[in-house]
Image: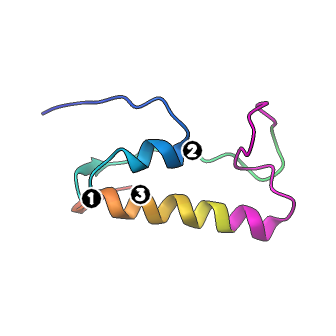
Amino acid sequence: MTAQIINADVFEGLMQIADHTVSMVVTSPPYYGLRNYGVDEQIGLERTFREYVIALVGVFAEVHRVLTDDGTL
């Protein structure tokens, strides 16, 4: 078993991972409008809730891409 830590923006980090190579993803996405971490374009500070959901859908589409067929989220 090999472990790798990628410290990056979620989209940049996921782009570094090949399709169907991850067995498990554990995440805690930020709530909408709750915190400001001082990072440009952070998820959770979109102008509308709809934009927030669209951002999360984009993240989880990439998570789906990297997960193995029997992977867990």
Ranked by sequence position, the earlier of labels 2 and 1 is: 1
User: In the image, which is nearer the foreground, mark 2 or mark 1?
Assistant: 1
Q: Which residue is mark 3?
A: 63
Q: Amino acid at mark 3?
A: Val
Q: Residue furthest left?
A: 1
User: In the image, which is nearer the foreground, mark 2 or mark 3?
Assistant: 3
Q: 41 left or right of 7?
A: right
Q: Amino acid at mark 2?
A: Ser
Predominant SS of the magenta segment: loop
Name the colouring of the figure. Answer: rainbow
**x%, y% of residue 63?**
41, 57
Q: Secondary structure at mark 2?
A: loop
Q: Quadrant of the C terminus?
A: bottom left
Q: Quadrant of the N terminus?
A: top left
Q: Amino acid at mark 1?
A: Asp
Q: Are marks 1 and 3 in contact (CB under 8 Å)?
A: no
Q: Secondary structure at mark 1?
A: loop
Q: Which residue is mark 1?
A: 19
**x%, y% of residue 22?**
26, 49
Q: Which residues are magenta?
A: 36-53
Ranked by sequence position, the earlier of labels 2 and 3 is: 2
